[in-house]
């Protein structure tokens, strides 16, 4: 178990992103237009989609021009595009697109309105584009959101390109993406021999994904066994929540007799800084366990300059625990059990046990007897025994001689 805290010095231009009408960009008109004020021109607008954002219910209005739409990807998940065309420099031409925001296949309460325009004044042509975010359809009472305080998306012009070739096409690019301040990510990773079941997951962050799916459609709880993992990403977006991005989980440890693992990870924004925290515990019957047979280790990783932080929770079995009952090794039928060791007698009869003293001395010293030492000791014992036999034989012969001589 461990507690990890971090504080990243990352400056971020909070509130500097302003969606809406942007400053106009002047592009010099072709020389012929200055003479006859007639110039066929096409104003092309592209809404680039990011962060799993898509659009539906799109509608277009073209003013002082003809116009048509250009489909993006079949599902509309990459971009939307439309073109306005006019052969007159005056009056100005304008195109308006309104669409509903869909995120990860789920409907949201948000809509966008993109306005692009071409104006001509004193020999110069001006282009600009703006994008606003609404809660609700802007044409039926939707509320305009403050891009710095109330909108979970940024939507602004990100590019302009002029092609003086046939059609005099000018392309304005507008990009929409999530305005995320902080993200807390987590990975629950059971190790070999551990299975987690009956999982629960809680978070206050409305922008949360579990195993890559929005929380509203994610499959929970689900069992985890090595090497399977649970992953999540909880984000605090502008206008949705002022609380830190935080998530908590709890899992039962299968077959453990009442042990559970619980943990949390959090990322908070504090002005120009970010605060991180993560921890996990092993509980038994809902209470802290003093010496549990499982452990949970937490490792933290900064993914993106402090605002995006990840914690990995590894749940493993403590080595050396739960070894079970040791059964005696059975003796095969018909075999002779090994002889029991006979302890040495209290006496010290060196003549009766000539090899005992050297062997006992080696064992007591803590040294392992090498094969060479064993051979030497055995040889010494044989020689000593032979000496005893020779001496005994000589004594027997002397006694026999005395008997015969007497």
Image (spheres, rainbow, N blue to C red):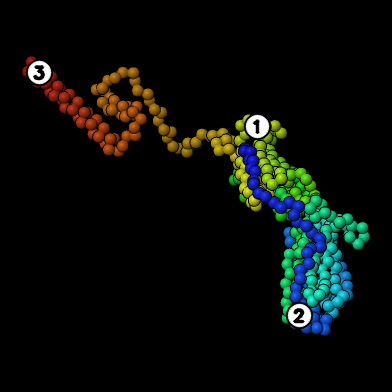
Whether residue 17 is visible, yes or no, is yes
Q: Position of residue 66 (x, y in %)?
A: 86, 77
Q: Quadrant of the N terminus?
A: top right
Q: Quadrant of the C terminus?
A: top left
Q: Is residue 224 above or below residue 284?
A: below
Q: Looking at the rendered structure, which numbered label has been put on residue 359?
A: none
Residue at 75 percent across and 56 percent down: it is 17
Q: Position of residue 393 (x, y in %)?
A: 16, 25
Q: Secondary structure at mark 3?
A: helix
* Residue at which label 1 appears: 289
Q: CA distance from mark 3 to mark 1?
A: 90 Å
Callout 3: few (<14), some (14-19), or many (20+) C-alpha neighbours within 10 Å? few
Residue at 16 percent across and 24 percent down: it is 391
Q: Secondary structure at mark 2?
A: loop
Q: Is residue 389 above or below residue 80?
A: above
Callout 2: few (<14), some (14-19), or many (20+) C-alpha neighbours within 10 Å? some
* Residue at which label 3 appears: 402
Q: Position of residue 111 (x, y in %)?
A: 84, 60
Q: Position of residue 30 (x, y in %)?
A: 76, 80
Question: Could you say which quadrant of the image residue 67 lies in?
Answer: bottom right
Residue at 55 percent across and 36 percent down: it is 320
What residue occupies the far front of the structure in this picture? 122
- Of marks 2 and 1, which one's residue comes earlier in the chain? 2
* Of the two numbered discs 2 and 3 in the rendering, the one whose residue sits closer to the viewer: 2
Q: Are marks 2 and 1 in contact (CB under 8 Å)?
A: no
Q: CA distance from mark 2 to mark 3?
A: 151 Å
* Residue at which label 2 appears: 30
């Amino acid at each position: 178990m461990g507690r990890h805290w971090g504080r990243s010095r990352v400056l971020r231009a909070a509130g500097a992103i302003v969606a809406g009408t942007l400053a106009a960009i002047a592009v010099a008109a072709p020389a012929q237009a200055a003479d006859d004020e007639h110039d066929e021109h096409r104003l092309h607008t592209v809404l680039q989609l990011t962060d799993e954002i898509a659009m539906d219910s799109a509608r277009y209005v073209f003013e002082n021009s003809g116009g048509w739409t250009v489909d993006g990807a079949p599902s509309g998940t990459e971009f939307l595009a439309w073109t306005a065309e006019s052969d007159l420099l005056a009056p100005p031409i304008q195109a308006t697109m309104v669409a509903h925001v869909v995120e990860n296949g789920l409907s949201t309460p948000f809509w966008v309105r993109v306005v692009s325009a071409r104006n001509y004044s004193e020999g110069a042509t001006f282009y600009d584009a703006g994008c606003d975010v609404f809660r609700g359809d802007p044409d039926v009472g939707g509320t305009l959101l403050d891009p710095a305080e109330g909108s979970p998306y940024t939507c602004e012009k990100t590019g302009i390109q002029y092609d003086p070739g046939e059609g005099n096409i000018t392309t304005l690019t507008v990009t929409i993406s999530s305005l995320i301040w902080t993200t807390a990510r987590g990975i629950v990773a059971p190790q070999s021999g551990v299975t987690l079941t009956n999982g629960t997951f809680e978070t206050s962050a409305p922008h949360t994904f579990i195993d890559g799916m929005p929380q509203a459609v994610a499959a929970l709880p689900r069992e985890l066994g090595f090497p399977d993992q649970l992953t999540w990403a909880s984000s605090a977006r502008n206008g949705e929540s002022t609380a830190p991005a935080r998530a908590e989980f709890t899992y039962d440890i299968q077959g453990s007799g009442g042990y559970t693992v619980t943990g949390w990870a959090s990322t908070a924004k504090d002005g120009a800084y970010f605060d991180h925290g993560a921890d996990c515990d092993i509980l038994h019957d809902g209470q802290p366990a003093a010496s549990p047979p499982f452990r949970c280790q937490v490792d933290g990783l900064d993914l993106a300059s402090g605002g995006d932080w990840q914690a990995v929770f590894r749940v493993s079995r403590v080595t050396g625990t739960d070894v079970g009952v040791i059964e005696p090794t059975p003796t095969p039928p018909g075999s002779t059990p090994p002889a029991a060791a006979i302890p040495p007698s209290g006496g010290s009869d060196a003549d009766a046990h000539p090899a005992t003293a050297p062997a006992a001395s080696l064992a007591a010293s803590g040294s392992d007897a090498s094969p060479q030492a064993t051979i030497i000791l055995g040889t010494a014992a044989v020689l000593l025994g032979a000496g005893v036999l020779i001496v005994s034989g000589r004594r027997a012969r002397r006694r026999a001689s005395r008997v015969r001589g007497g």
